[in-house]
Image: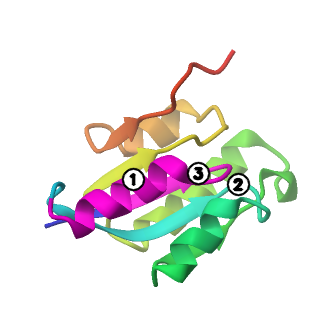
Amino acid sequence: MKRIVVLISGTGSNMQAIVDACEKQQINGEVVAVIANKDTAKGLEKAAERGIATHALSHKAFDSREAYDAELQSLIDTYQPDLVILAGFMRILTAEFTRHFAGRMLNIHPSLLP
């Protein structure tokens, strides 16, 4: 079974679909954590209601994109994920971050960021 960390920025509808698919064994995995870049992200509440660990890590608390991504990477790594899913995560990530999770990261955002 794959350990999955989901990154969100909003309502978490895609995250919820992933959690549901895992519970129905349509996905051979378990969402072990949901992380948002906004503490107001409604998806955090949905995940907490399902007993999933949640974290809000605001990019506004960091001096640079690199510093934020380093902290986000460290937080994700504590869960030892097999897969990191960007499910409507509204941040452009650094090359170092994407290299770290190369082959283990999937972006399912419904549109491209500008």
* Secondary element type, mark 3: strand
Can you identify the residue that label 1 sits on? 17
Q: Quadrant of residue 102?
A: top left
Residue 103 % position (x, y): 25, 38
Mark linked to residue 37: 2
Residue at point 78%, 51% (across, down): 59
Can you identify the residue that label 3 sits on? 8
- Between 61 and 108, the residue placed more toward the observer is 108
**Circle 3: is it few (<14), some (14-19), or many (20+) Cα within 10 Å?**
many
Spatial separation of the CA atoms under disc 1 and disc 3: 13 Å
- Type of the residue with mark 1: Ala
* Secondary element type, mark 2: loop
Residue at point 43%, 74% (across, down): 78
Q: Is residue 37 above or below residue 88?
A: below
Compare marks 1 and 2 and give the one earlier in the sequence: 1
Q: Is residue 10 above or below residue 71?
A: above
Spatial separation of the CA atoms under disc 3 and disc 2: 7 Å
Residue at point 46%, 78% (across, down): 52
- Between 67 and 58, the residue placed more toward the observer is 58
Question: What residue range appears in magenta?
Answer: 5-25
